[in-house]
Image: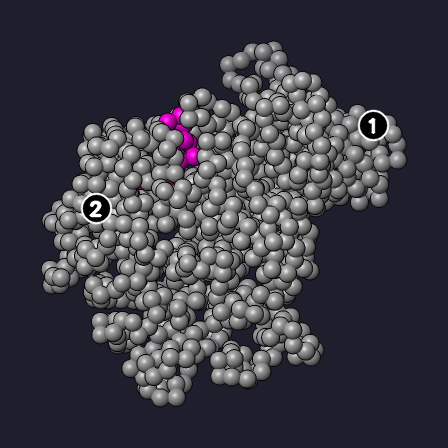
Amino acid sequence: MAAPLQAGPWPGLSRALAAGLLALLSVALALGGDPRGGGPRFPWDAVRLPRHVIPLRYHLLIHPNLTTLTFSGTAAIEVTVTRQTSAVVLHSKRLNITGAAIEAGSARSAQEARVLEHQPFEQVALLAAEPLRAGQNYTLSIQYFANLSESFHGFYKSTYRTREGELRVLAATHFEPTAARMAFPCFDEPAFKARFSIQIRREPKHLALSNMPIVKSVNITPWLVEDHFDTTVKMSTYLVAFIISDFKSISKITSHGIKISVYTVPDKISHADYALDAAVKLLDFCEDYFSIPYPLPKQDLAAIPDFQSGAMENWGLTTYRESALLYDPEKSSASSKLWITMIIAHELAHQWFGNLVTMEWWNDLWLNEGFAKFMEFVSVSVTHPELRVEDFFLRRCFDAMAVDALHSSHPISTPVEDPAQILEMFDNVSYEKGSCILNMLRDYLTADVFKAGLVQYLQKYSYQNTKNEDLWNSMSNICPTVGRDKNELQGDGFCRRSQESSSNAHWTKGETLDLRAMMDTWTLQKGFPVVTVTVRGKNVHLQQQRYVKGEDSPSSTGYLWHIPLTYKTSKSDTVQRFLMTTKADVIILPEEVEWVKFNVDMNGYYIVHYEGDGWDRLINLLKENHTVISSNDRASLINDIFQLVRIKKLPISKAFDLTLYLKHERHIMPVLQGMNELIPIYRLVERRDTDGTEKQLKDYIVNLFKDLIDKQSWSDEGSVSERLLRDSLLLFACVHRYQPCVDKAKGYFTEWQKSNGTLSLPADVKTAVYAVGAQTSEGWDFLLSKYRLHSFSVERENIEFALSLSRSKDKLQWLMDQGLRGDIIRTQDLPHIIVFVAKNPSGYHLAWTFLKENWEKVVEKFELGSNSVAAIVTGVTRRYSTRSQLAQVKEFFSSLEEKSTQLRCVQQAIETIEDNIQWMDGNFEKVKTWLQNNHL
């Protein structure tokens, strides 16, 4: 319900003029009176739609005009009514409705309906001349027109330039989570699944795509064609998609007979082959793994020139930003190949998790995203084993923990109402933490049981909507070996494990397994536990508490997890398992051991503290013979020890003692984890340095990895992991001015410049070469001139990064200004450009000023609550560590309207700065002392 009119909305205006404006406003707001203007009141006062009118099928006719950048449409929506009502409430946002009618299923005459709009809730109401009766079907007909959106959501405009420099316009959609209502009036909530029959009018030179194939095209006039698409399966509104463009495509048929096509702007179709081959393999894998056929006749993958996120899983027409789909075998790096494969795997997994079975409401978004994120690993490890995706899984769990360790985190499943809150769910907790707890669950249940549970869940809930508990119930009713006799299932629906082998006396030792109770502890409460391990002879004492950054004695007494603990010892390589369901417990070992390592391979979403001399024994193990434990175990020790410093369980000197072993480390995961812990500390020290500690710390980090850096060949040889490691090491060395690296990169850059950019540089060393080249004004200008060329399109992000390393404030400012303007640098790239500039010591003031001055524009373009806005807010402030910086950040955000102030990313930014201040106060002097005592 809209708020009553205030006494004087426009101070100083004559009453007559104000009344005139109000009259105009009421016409603009609604064809039928505005609740504030004394007309009928809006009949609904909740953000969620009423449940008694249910859509069955939409007939949409959409007619975009790519010259005037507008579109018109008609929506005929077949609905069924479960309770008598005089009003139908549905969603509409920025659509100008010109007419509406309601027709009873039996009658052939439509009654005109009055339309009211309630903008705060993005709703319209159709008021019926006579009540709609329960048990009857009706058709709602709505005519409307609107502008193509200028942002990246709804039905929006995108542009690109041909090789010859001609500007071309296309129109594409991106609806998730709440923007279908910007393209057609609809019941825009995931549980209102319906079928969609779509018709699109276009010029003959264009091509229209939608979720389904075209069944016929009709020439309306010589310059207008109407494409009729086949009716979709039953699905949610956010998965509807259409694109009107002049794209070209290439296609293949999968072994199950599905036609896969990749669509791109004409000049880039030569970069579509890799994605097409990957999609064919991955779709085949999903059909086999889920034992459910893909239900549509085709799957298109379209690269959209302007795209905010990485990709979107629209059913049958997945959309991607160009860098997430297009691969140039000559120029693209190994990391680009890995990222493209993972993203395609993610979107194709969604065709089952998300599209076929959808969460009931956005509070359980993780049922879509956590699964798709997890399935990236399951599918790519089978279809593309050479990419060794398992080497990169831990990184995402560490990233999730970084956010989840803050007070401002949220449970995986958390209540949300309005569009900004819904958007905020698309974060590291829903995606990364979701995938990490699923990985933990698979390790706990075994891969076979886990898979059988997923298949049962998908089969049971196909074309329906689910809640958290539906998944756990499906998982609980599965017995260890699929295909065995059903009699293993006890009368209570729980499996008892047989004691076949020591490894399969898995967890439960014949007890019943209450999966839902266990998983609720991971999805319904925020954060994660730190398990403290104290070894006394053969007894291992365990305690759990919530880990909260910056708090040594957290006040989180109510927190308890059911933790599937795993451990190995110096005496046994076999993984031992123990389910910890209480605050404290004891494990008795068969014999005394020299060391014990918990959370084997970091399959569990928790960290471990070893009391007494536990850490010293592990540090010693790493020093003496680090390969006794796996590379994932080594990476997890590096992660855990630095996190424990933050809650004062250990001194920083102990964490630095552990890093000494890295001189001998050769594996990508522990090396990158070492960098991920040490470089942020260096960045904090760099900003505050007065006495040379910064140089000492930089020298220490460079020396730690020096042998490994010197060993790198400047080529594209080796496995994907080796190539990614080379890319990271050389970039690190060059950016931190390790002279041999800088000299080599300079040589390459000079040669490349002399050849006018035609010399082919090894893909994996390019970023380092560009980074060094961009340090001179002339090199920077040359890079920018190449950035603008078609032939360098797959390298745009590498060049943007290099350009952002300039020490010239003018150049850095220019980059951000251009990103906002959007013609030389696409606005889709602005979030990471701002963050790149903020990481640059010459740029961090500029980035903060830019954010403050352009806040309104950034929010308008990227939407309040979006991941893009969150990335900017946290990225710009991540390295702040002084009280005056904290005060500035608090002051700016509290000056904004309430919706901005309450954003989770603002709370995260403030907490992170407070944590940085505390860290610097407590550890700066200690790091300095340690460095003086430990020269490499």
Q: How crowded is the residue under tag 2: few (<14 C-alpha within 10 Å), some, or many (20+)?
A: many
Give the residue pinned by disc 2. Answer: 734
Residue type beneath disc 1: Ala
Q: Quadrant of the N terminus?
A: top right
How is this picture coloured? one colour
Q: Residue at x 25, y 44 (%)?
A: 768
Q: Of the numbered discs in the image, which one, if any, rests on residue 36?
A: none
Determine whether label 1 and label 2 are within 8 Å by CB. no
For the residue pair 634 and 18, the one nearer the viewer reads as: 634
Examine the rendering and report whether any part of residue 203 can be seen: yes
Per the rendering, the mark at residue 110 is 1
- Figure check: 106 above or below 910: above
Q: What residue is rendered at 15% in x and 49% in y?
A: 740
Q: CA distance from mark 1 to mark 2?
A: 71 Å
Helix, strand or loop at label 2? It is helix
Q: Residues within 10 Å of mark 1 (few under 14, many from 20)?
A: some
Q: Residue at x 21, y 32 (%)?
A: 754
Looking at the picture, how far across and down is residue 815, in whole percent?
31, 30
Secondary structure beneath label 1: strand
Q: Is residue 17 magenta?
A: no
Is residue 834 one of those drawn in magenta? yes
- In this view, the residue in front, 93 or 61, is 61
Kind of residue indicated by mark 2? Cys
